[in-house]
Image: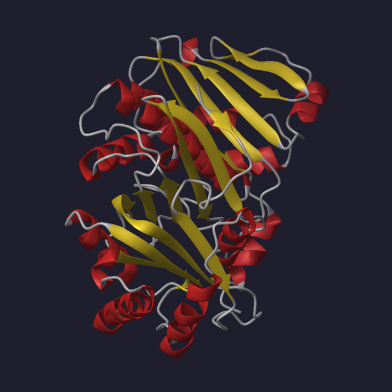
């Protein structure tokens, strides 16, 4: 059993965080963050499947793949450091070297991450000054974690944090995370930027195995706009300071740890879907009664990614034809004449479709149900016992407005 609590990346033992306004963003808001581990951490990561990979993605991917321990993460918002060539990669190296110098560690133990406008080079005078300023501000307080989560935001309207405690080998273990992401989200690995800390003792290999499994049913099951970012990065750091027997194999303790990690990643994924650019509600699709997990996932993601469906949800319109149409072109085979569909929210439940046919439902009730902050489309294929859940948001006028002048 896990216990959720109000925590951030500093909640697990051994972690500190800081934020700073380095002047990268025009607004002058905090735009740099640092996570620091007092003890070198086992690290795992998943990264964008986009062929165009930002320089920090390449840097982090290579360090983690080599099995390096990690002591610090430096994050900037405002400039993505993507499509910046060898110069961009050299700036990752320069950032890591600066952090290593002031922290007394090796550059190979420093991860970097960036988010913002693609194609611009990092203002390295501001980045290096920001690194120097961040170190004395490092703190293990809850406030420090919260400010770090705010500093990595771009078009996000709220910061995203979650934390939980559970027991391993008789020891209390904590996992916490922060993430950012509102647009350019259609993950095929994880999502925009997510940083997770834990004091569990777990090997690099088992940490990577757990993360790789978990992202498939969490971050890989959300979509805001169908665009897969160049900068997608999800990193997990494990300090081992909880004192549990180290997890080095896929034992029962591994499953307990993976389950807790799943909860953290699911929380962050849902927060990002709910905060999609311009969104007014979280749209959840539960695909049940499937023959296979792959069938359920494919169908759920097709519905959650359909612009016509998203527009109907924004209009509080129970236009079930949009949903069945998206399912039909998904590439997954199912029997339309068997499908049941209901909409569920805090306002109640209404069955829209039964055995592939309109139920003659109340439009007034459907509109009330679809007017809530979270709306679930519950689909029963009646073909098997497998299921999958995907998360997205509605498509609003504001989404177009935000992205029409993103650079300005």
201 sits left or right of 400 in the view: left
Q: Residue at x 52, y 67 (%)?
A: 138
**360 over 247 or under it: above or below:** above
Considering depth in this image, is 405 or 47 the residue closer to the camera?
47
Residue projecting furthest to the left: 66
151 sits left or right of 215 in the view: right
Query: Can you give x and y, in whole percent of width and height, for residue 160 in the image?
Result: 59, 50
Q: How is the image coloured?
A: secondary structure
**243 over 56 or under it: above or below:** above
> How many circles with numbers are drawn on the protein?
0
Q: Residue at x 46, y 14 (%)?
A: 381
Considering depth in this image, is 329 or 285 the residue closer to the camera?
285
**295 over 360 or under it: above or below:** below
Q: Residue at x 42, y 82 (%)?
A: 122
Query: Can you give x and y, in whole percent of width and height, for residue 215 in the image?
Result: 37, 40
Residue 306 at least partly seen = no
**Image quadrant of residue 68?**
bottom left
Query: Can you give x and y, in whole percent of width and height, for residue 18 in the image?
Result: 54, 67
Q: Quadrant of the C terminus?
A: bottom right
Q: Residue at x 33, y 68 (%)?
A: 56
Residue 71 at least partly seen = yes
Residue projecting furthest to the right: 364
Considering depth in this image, is 231 or 199 the residue closer to the camera?
199
């Amino acid at each position: 059993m896990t216990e959720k609590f109000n925590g951030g990346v500093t909640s697990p033992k051994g972690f500190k965080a800081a934020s700073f306004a380095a002047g990268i963003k025009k607004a002058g808001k905090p735009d740099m963050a640092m996570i620091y581990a007092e003890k070198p951490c086992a690290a795992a990561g998943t990264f964008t499947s986009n062929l165009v990979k930002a320089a920090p993605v390449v840097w982090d991917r290579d360090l983690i793949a080599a099995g390096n321990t990690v002591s610090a993460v430096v994050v900037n918002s405002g400039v993505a450091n993507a499509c910046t060539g060898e110069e961009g990669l050299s700036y990752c190296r320069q950032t890591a070297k600066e952090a290593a110098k002031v922290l007394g560690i090796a550059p190979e133990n420093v991860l970097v991450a960036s988010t913002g406008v693609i194609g611009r080079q990092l203002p390295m005078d501001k980045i290096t000054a920001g690194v120097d300023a961040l170190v004395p501000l490092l703190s293990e307080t809850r406030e420090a974690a919260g400010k770090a989560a705010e500093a990595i935001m771009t078009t996000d309207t709220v910061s995203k944090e979650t934390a939980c405690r559970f027991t391993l080998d008789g020891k209390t273990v904590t996992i916490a995370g922060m993430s950012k992401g509102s647009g350019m989200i259609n993950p095929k690995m994880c999502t925009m930027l997510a940083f997770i800390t834990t004091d569990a003792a777990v090997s690099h290999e088992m940490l990577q195995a757990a993360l790789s499994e978990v992202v498939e049913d969490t971050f890989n099951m959300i979509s805001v706009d169908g665009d897969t970012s160049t900068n997608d990065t999800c990193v997990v750091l494990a300090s081992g300071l909880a004192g549990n027997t180290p997890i080095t194999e896929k034992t029962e303790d591994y499953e307990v740890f993976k389950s807790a990690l799943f909860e953290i990643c699911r929380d962050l994924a849902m927060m990002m879907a709910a905060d999609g650019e311009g969104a007014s509600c979280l749209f959840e699709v539960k695909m049940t009664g499937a023959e296979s997990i792959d069938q359920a996932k494919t169908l759920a993601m097709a519905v959650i990614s359909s612009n016509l469906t998203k527009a109907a949800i924004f209009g509080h319109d129970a236009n079930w034809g949009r949903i069945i149409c998206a399912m039909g072109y998904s590439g997954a085979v199912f029997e339309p004449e068997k499908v049941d569909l209901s909409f569920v929210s805090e306002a109640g439940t209404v069955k829209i479709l039964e055995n592939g046919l309109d139920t003659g439902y109340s439009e007034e009730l459907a509109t009330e149900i679809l007017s809530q902050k979270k709306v679930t489309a519950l689909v029963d294929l009646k073909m098997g016992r497998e299921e999958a859940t995907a998360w997205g948001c509605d498509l609003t006028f504001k989404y177009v407005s935000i992205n029409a002048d993103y650079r300005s």
